[in-house]
């Protein structure tokens, strides 16, 4: 009898322990366990799962629970109260984190703990509709972006032997995407129990993330050999960082290829922010034929997520290619699909645009990472990652504001989206191709 009970216990226990062992084996493969990268992958998965729980709760409160006209006003208020201050705070995040390079684990843990506490505040606000919803949401947003900036600065410290930065970022990003995909339906299920429950789930996840942050290797707190850099590509700054204090520190010595790649990435990030807000209201008002608004949005969301995952996987496979040419190509593809979708507007083309935009965003960001690894001196590389990520987040905010302001006309809206991408592509294509021609034969590829 006792043996039978033990067998039943093992059978019930195996799915959990077996899954945990499988995840640990995958995240720690190829030296990632020894370097500490595996622990960062797991931490990023917890971060993504917690963020999606908060997103489910807020979307149900601010967007789905009220009529379309009222929802648009509430989202506009949400943007005004949260995103507007964020555009002012975002430029401060990178320089502030540069001042505490020895506390990266503490900074990541602090960002997790702040979101855990704010999730508790939000759990009351989503029921009462109190004004505390908006400052708490702003706090969650800022803490989430602060975590992302610190993570970008941490990855170069955890590279396993013979691992490129683009490959490491691909693995971290894929871990976050998989966790998000698992947590999204769980969050939706918790939402059916009550509006508070996804936020309770987020609280548990962020507390776990707080603990996991301190399990990262101590070397992520090391700032040995680092300096501060400015986003400038002029000849005066390309010879090395200025060690004397400057009034406005930023990214220096990044080179023209990095600045052009950053501008192209900003145009894609602006487009994704635009599509999220514009399509959210467009498909709610005019859902896919025969489908509800929630299903229509789900189709577009799954398309974007699948494209993003595919772009991340392809980024690792293309690690020996010229990053400049990859960026030029994927942005051109997005531009072509956006123009086609605006001229021949249909549900299928909207889903295709979401997938291609997700694919391009992932692949272009990995290519930008490769350029930073190749062209930016090591002593300012982590600073470059932190500040470039902050600028990309600001571009997303700008795109979201544009999407919210436009009338709900699919052809006009996607034409505006195409114009956003076109402006980024036309202003950077010549510089990126020129950089690839000048450097392709002399500089080693990022392996």
Image (tube, rainbow, N blue to C red):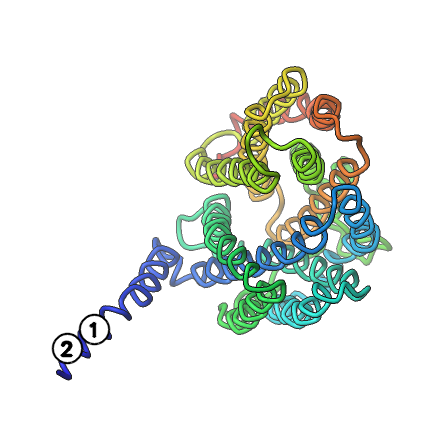
Residue 225 lies, with reference to residue 415, above or below; the image says below
Say if residue 282 shows up in the picture: yes
For mark 1, what is the residue? 8
Q: Residues within 10 Å of mark 1 (few under 14, many from 20)?
A: few
Within the image, what quadrant is residue 358 found in? top right
Q: Secondary structure at mark 1?
A: helix
Within the image, what quadrant is residue 324 found in? top right
Q: Residues within 10 Å of mark 2 (few under 14, many from 20)?
A: few
Quarter that holds the N terminus: bottom left
Say if residue 324 shows up in the picture: no
**Image coordinates for residue 21, horizontal then vertical, percent:** 32, 63
Q: Residue at x 67, y 35 (%)?
A: 279
Within the image, what quadrant is residue 102 found in? bottom right
**Image coordinates for residue 191, horizontal then vertical, percent:** 57, 59
Residue 302 lies, with reference to residue 250, above or below; the image says above
**Image coordinates for residue 12, horizontal then vertical, percent:** 27, 69
**Image coordinates for residue 31, horizontal then vertical, percent:** 36, 57
Q: Secondary structure at mark 2?
A: helix
Residue 16 lies, with reference to residue 358, above or below; the image says below
Q: Residue at x 72, y 56 (%)?
A: 94
Left or right for 195, reference 25: right
Q: CA distance from mark 2 to mark 1?
A: 6 Å
Residue with the most extreme right position: 247
Left or right for 25, reference 333: left
For mark 2, what is the residue? 4
Is disc 2 in contact with disc 1, using a CB cutoff of under 8 Å?
A: yes
Quarter that holds the C terminus: top left
């Amino acid at each position: 009898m006792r043996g039978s009970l033990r067998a039943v216990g093992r059978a019930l226990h195996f799915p959990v322990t077996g899954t945990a062992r499988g995840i640990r084996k995958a995240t720690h493969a190829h030296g990632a366990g020894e370097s500490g990268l595996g622990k960062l992958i797991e931490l990023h998965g917890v971060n993504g799962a917690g963020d999606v729980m908060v997103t489910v709760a807020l979307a149900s409160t601010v967007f789905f629970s009220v009529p379309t006209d009222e929802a648009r006003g509430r989202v506009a208020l949400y943007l005004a109260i949260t995103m507007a201050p964020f555009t002012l705070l975002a430029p401060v995040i990178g320089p502030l984190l540069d001042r505490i390079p020895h506390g990266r684990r503490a900074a990541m843990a602090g960002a997790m703990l702040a979101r855990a506490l704010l999730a508790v505040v939000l759990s009351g606000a989503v029921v009462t509709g109190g004004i505390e919803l908006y400052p708490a949401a702003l706090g969650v947003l800022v803490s989430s972006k602060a975590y992302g900036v610190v993570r970008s600065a941490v990855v170069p410290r955890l590279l396993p032997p013979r691992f490129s930065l683009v490959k490491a970022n691909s693995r971290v990003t894929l871990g976050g995407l998989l966790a998000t995909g698992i947590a999204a339906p769980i969050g939706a299920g918790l939402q059916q129990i009550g509006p508070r429950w996804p936020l309770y789930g987020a609280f548990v996840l962020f507390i776990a993330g707080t603990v996991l942050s301190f399990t990262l290797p101590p070397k992520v707190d090391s700032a040995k050999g680092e300096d501060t850099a400015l986003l400038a590509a002029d000849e005066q700054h390309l010879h090395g960082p200025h060690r004397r204090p400057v009034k406005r520190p930023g990214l220096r010595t990044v080179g023209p290829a990095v600045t052009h790649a950053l501008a192209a990435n900003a145009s894609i990030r602006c487009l994704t922010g635009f599509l999220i807000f514009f399509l959210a209201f467009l498909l709610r008002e005019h859902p896919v034929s025969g489908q509800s608004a929630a299903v229509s949005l789900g189709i577009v969301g799954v398309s974007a997520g699948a494209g993003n995952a595919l772009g991340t996987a392809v980024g690792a496979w293309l690690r020996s290619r010229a990053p400049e040419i990859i960026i030029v190509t994927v942005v051109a593809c997005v531009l072509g699909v956006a123009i086609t979708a605006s001229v021949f507007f249909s549900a299928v083309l909207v889903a295709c645009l979401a997938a291609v935009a997700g694919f391009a965003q992932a692949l272009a960001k990995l290519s930008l990472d490769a350029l930073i690894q190749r062209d930016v001196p090591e002593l300012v590389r982590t600073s470059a990652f932190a500040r470039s990520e902050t600028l990309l987040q600001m571009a997303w905010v700008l795109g979201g504001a544009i999407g919210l302001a436009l009338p709900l006309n699919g052809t006009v809206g996607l034409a505006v989206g195409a114009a956003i991408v076109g402006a980024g592509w036309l202003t950077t294509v010549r510089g990126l191709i020129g950089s690839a021609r000048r450097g392709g034969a002399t500089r080693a590829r990022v392996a």
